[in-house]
Amino acid sequence: MNQQQFSSSHTPGLDRFWAVIPAGGVGTRLWPLSRAAAPKFLHDLTGSGQTLIRATYDRLQPLAGERVLVVTGEAHHEAVCAQLSDVAQENFLFEPEPKDSAAAIGLAAAVLSQRDPEAIMGSFAADQVIGPDDVFRTAVAEAIATAATNKIVTIGIKPTYPSTGFGYIRQGDKLDVDGAPTAYQVVKFVEKPEVDVAKRYIEAGNFFWNAGMFVAPVKLLLEHLAANEPELHAGVTKIAKAIVSGGANEVLSDVWHQLPKTAIDYAVAEPAAKAGDVAVIPGDFTWDDVGDFAAIARLNPAADDSGVTVIGETPRVYSDAANGVVVTDTSRVIALIGVEDIVVVDTPDALLVTTTKHAQSVKQAVESIKAHGDDDVL
């Protein structure tokens, strides 16, 4: 599917759409594969031959063309630029230190506002697995058309089970939007629920998972940011003006570390929903945020009847009456005998052994390792 199939005559707002790719976060539940110097978006976790960030770019490029803006850490400058060599240098924004999503997305909105106050931006995380791409792009095109009516639009994922790990979006009345037949008003965003509440959401049929995908006119997004996080808004605006005028380095280093650390959901999405300014487009595509090694096992079924999923360039894995997932970055022989739902992650300087059931607990292990001062493996 090419960009011509999404023409501005059929998709209002497409001619001023920018795809923004925030590439941040370490992905601590995927340690020791994902680390501060090599976060999960720089890995191929699906066996596709593509890193997650490159797959994200390829998914968005047919809609955005050359209008792609990437926000990532200064520490990943070289690796991200190598992955996205098609993106113009002026369309990379580098954070001096990690902040939460409101700072990254707010800075992107502020920079785009300086370039084109009428721009519509769509923010899509660099570390999600989505498919099929054409179904995703159709949903984004509807979101762009809805954003053109002065709405902040989220793409909601139809829940497949009562997850307690995601926030939810409550769908309201249907909207009458040209080019967006599945647009609905958002009643509110709700926090990660307990399992019994999540079950009720599933049964109700009008709740979606919040995947953190937002499409919005930059002007409206910045208005809500200014109203709810004025210090953050002032900071990113000051930085954006310096970036556009060509003298950003000193201002960035002075201002960035002072910015409040908060999520875009709290800074913009939730208060905007209360104000009636948020819409949702249901996403019929598959979606996974690859949050832990259980997700990797789910996304990469065993290639043979061994029952073991193996990921690595030169794997030497042997199993007998075992199943699970092995991720190896070494040439070491790994033998699994009589173990179920095992997770083994083997790197030159760190080894993780757990089970898919306990995959979420890897984050606590990382925190413990950090507390013991072993930062060299993080």
Image (cartoon, rainbow, N blue to C red):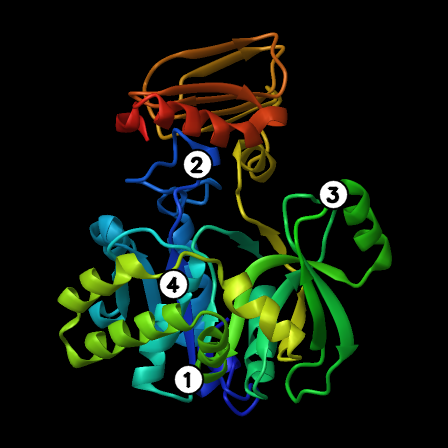
Residue 48 vs 60, above or below: the answer is above
To which residue does mark 3 refer? 194
Marks 4 and 2, how far apart at CA: 20 Å
Q: Nearer the viewer, mark 4 or mark 1?
A: 4
The secondary structure type at the circle numbered 2 is helix
* Label 3: how many Cα within 10 Å (few below 14, some 14–19, many 20+): few
Amino acid found under the numbered disc labelled 2: Thr
* Residue 230, x across and y down, in percent: 41, 73
Please tell me which residue is depicted at 37% across the width and 25% down the height of the picture: 371
- Residue at the image position 38 percent from the left and 36 percent from the top: 34
Residue 227 visible in rendering: yes
User: Foreground mark, 3 or 2?
Assistant: 3
- Between the C-alphas of marks 1 and 3, the distance is 39 Å
Disc 3 vs disc 2: Cβ atoms closer than 8 Å?
A: no
Q: Report which residue position mark 1 lands on.
A: 119
Q: Nearer the viewer, residue 10 or 222?
A: 222
The residue nearer to you, when weighing 303 against 125, is 125
Asked whether disc 1 touches disc 3, contact meaning CB atoms under 8 Å apart, the reply is no
Kind of element beneath mark 4: helix
Closer to the chain start, of discs 3 and 2, is: 2
State the CA–CA distance, disc 4 to disc 3.
29 Å
Residue for badge 4: 103
Q: Residue at x 54, y 28 (%)?
A: 361
Q: Amino acid at mark 3?
A: Glu
How far apart marks 2 and 1 lie (CA) works out to 34 Å
What is the x, y in percent for residue 36? 32, 39
Label 2 crowding class (10 Å Cα cut-off): few <14, some 14-19, many 20+? many
Q: Position of residue 363 (x, y in %)?
A: 48, 32
Q: Which mark is residue 28?
A: 2
